[in-house]
Image (cartoon, rainbow, N blue to C red):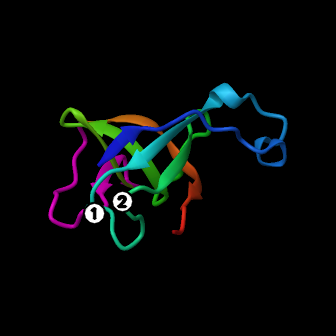
Amino acid sequence: MFAPSYNLTIPEEYLDNRNPEDFIALRIVGNDAYPLYHDGDVLLIDTVTEPRDGGPVVVYHADTLQLGSLQLNRFQPLDPCLPPTKDFRIIGIPALLIRHFE
C-alpha cells in the first residue's frame, strides 16, 4: 500500500515551527485505499503527534504499512475486507495529502 517517497520540501507555514524530521513522506501504491487515496498520492505523515481515537493513523502491521483508524485501542484498516487488530505499531498520522494531476 505504501512505498518510501522522494525528497520532499515541506512548506514553512505548514511546519508551524516544528522540525521537518518529525515527518515522513509515503507514496500510495495500488488501489487498496481508493477512493480516499489514489495510486501515486503522497502522504506526509506526522510521526510525533499522538493519534486520537477514531482518527486516521498509519501503522506497521503484518509486515506492511497500513492506513486506517484507531478505535478503542484497536486498529481498523481502511480496507473493509481486513479485520481490526490489536497487534500493530503506530507510525504516525496523515497530515497532508499531495496529489499530482496530469
**Disc 2, SS:** loop
For image coordinates 49% across by 58% down, the residue present is 55
- Seen from the viewer's position, the closer of residues 6 and 1 is 6
Q: Residue 1's x, y, as percent?
A: 29, 49
Q: Report the side of 64 relative to 44 (left or right).
A: left
Q: CA distance from mark 1 to mark 2?
A: 6 Å
First in sequence: mark 1 vs mark 2: 1
**Disc 1, SS:** loop
Q: Magenta residues? A: 69-87
Res 98 → quadrant: bottom right
- Seen from the viewer's position, the closer of residues 5 and 81 is 5
Q: Amino acid at mark 1?
A: Asn
Q: Are marks 1 and 2 in contact (CB under 8 Å)?
A: yes
Q: Report the side of 58 relative to 97 (left or right).
A: left
> How many other residues sit within 10 Å of disc 2, few (<14), some (14-19) or many (≥20)?
some
> How many other residues sit within 10 Å of disc 1, few (<14), some (14-19) or many (≥20)?
some
Q: Report the side of 61 relative to 51 (left or right).
A: left
Up-down: is 15 above or below 79? Answer: above
Q: Residue 39's x, y, as percent?
A: 36, 59
For image coordinates 18% across by 36% down, the residue present is 62
Res 48 → quadrant: top right
Residue underneath mark 2: 39
Q: Amino acid at mark 2?
A: Asp
For image coordinates 77% across by 33% down, the residue present is 18
Q: Report the side of 64 relative to 17 (left or right).
A: left
Number of numbered discs visible in the structure rendering: 2
Any mark on residue 31, and which? 1
Q: Residue 13's x, y, as percent?
A: 84, 48
Q: Residue 50's x, y, as percent?
A: 57, 40
**Magenta stretch mostly in which secondary structure?**
loop
Q: Is residue 31 magenta?
A: no
For image coordinates 47% across by 38% down, the residue present is 5
